[in-house]
Amino acid sequence: MTPHDTPVLRVAGRPVGRYVTRPELPPRLSPRPYLHPVTTLAGTAVTDLSPADHTHHLGVGVAVPDVEGANFWGGRTYVRDQGPSELDNHGAQRHSSFQLRDPDGFVEELRWVAAGAELLRERRTVAATELTSTAWALDFTFSLTNVTARPLSIGSPATNGRPGAAYGGFFWRARKEQRPPEVFTVDREGEAAVHGTRADWVALAGWGSAAREGEGEAESGGSWTLVFAGATEQTRQDPWFVRAEEYPGVGSSLASEERLAVAPGETAVRRIVTVVADGRLPRLEAAALVRKAVSQ
C-alpha cells in the first residue's frame, strides 16, 4: 500500500514515478522530497537513489549547495581556499502540504529550514503528460520565496571558487550503467561540449539492457533517452550542469558566474520539462518531442 503522502504519478494509467515527501535520511544528506523511481512507459528505471558514488543524490528534485551558507545539497561543502569540507551546516526541505493531488501530478508547499530557522518557502508543481506511446513528459516548476527579513543569496561551488561546478537547482540523477550515456544538444555532442552551455535542450541517451554490471535485461530494461528543456525565459538563462563519465546526471544552474540574490518577500521561479522516452532518440525526434512537451 502506498502511504497517503507518497503520491504515485501515472501516465495513461501506468505508474511512472513515486514521490517521497518525508524521507528518513541522516542530516548529512540534506533530507528533501524526491521522485524515485522514475521510469519510461515500458518500465525502465531512469533515476538512482543514494548511489555509492554520491549518496546525497536523490532521484529527481531540487537541491542547492549554498543558501547563505546552509547546504541543501548534501555531502561536503566547498569552501573557498579550502576545498570540499565536512561542515555541520546541512538544511532540510520539509513537506508542509499538498494544495492539489491528482494521478498525473500535484502542487506542494515546502519549507527550507536550516539551524532551526526557515529561510525559503517553496511551491512545487509537478505534472506528468503522455506524449506518444513510448514517451511522456515531466513538467517540474519550483518557486522559492525568501521568508526572512533580510536578503538571501544562493551560491554554488563555482561561485565559491571551484570552476565548472555550478550545480544547484533542479537536478536529475540517472542510473549508472557500464557505459556512460551519450550527451547531446541540437548542435553539440559530448559532456565537455555540453556542460555549462545555455542550450535550448540537453539529452542523455542510455544503453539499457545488461548495461549495468551483474544485471540482465529483465532488471535493467531497454535503452532510454531523457531530454531536458528550460520552459521559461528565466530558466533558459541558467547554464546546464551535465555529468556523464563520472556519473549520469543533469541539472540547471541557479548560480553559475555569480550568486543569485533573493530579496525579502521576493520569489525565484524555474520550470524544467523533461521528456522520458524509451529507446535512443535521434536529434530531430528529441527536438520535436521536447517542443511538444513544453507547449502543452
Image (tube, rainbow, N blue to C red):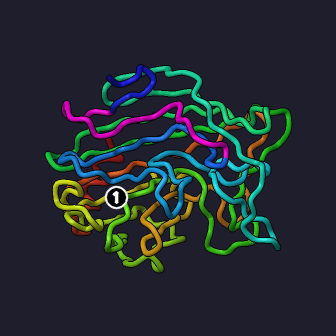
Q: Is residue 285 visible from the viewing direction of this image?
A: no
Q: Which residue is mark 1?
A: 227
Q: Which residues are magenta?
A: 9-27
Q: Residue at x 58, y 51 (%)?
A: 169
* Residue 230 colored in magenta in the image: no
> Circle 1: is it few (<14), some (14-19), or many (20+) Cα within 10 Å?
many
Residue 99 is situated, as x and y percent measured from the top left of the image, at 50, 20
Q: Give the residue drawn at x 56%, y 31%.
A: 123
Q: Nearer the viewer, residue 104 or 197?
A: 104
Q: Residue furthest left?
A: 133
Q: Residue furthest front?
A: 214
| x and y percentages locating residue 100 in the rendered image | 44, 21
**Residue at 35% over, 64% down:** 203
Q: Quadrant of residue 218?
A: bottom left
Residue 232: give x, y in percent of width and height: 49, 48
- Residue 45, relative to residue 128: is it above or below? below
Give the vertical position of 99 relative to 282 (above or below): above
Quadrant where the N terminus sits is: top left
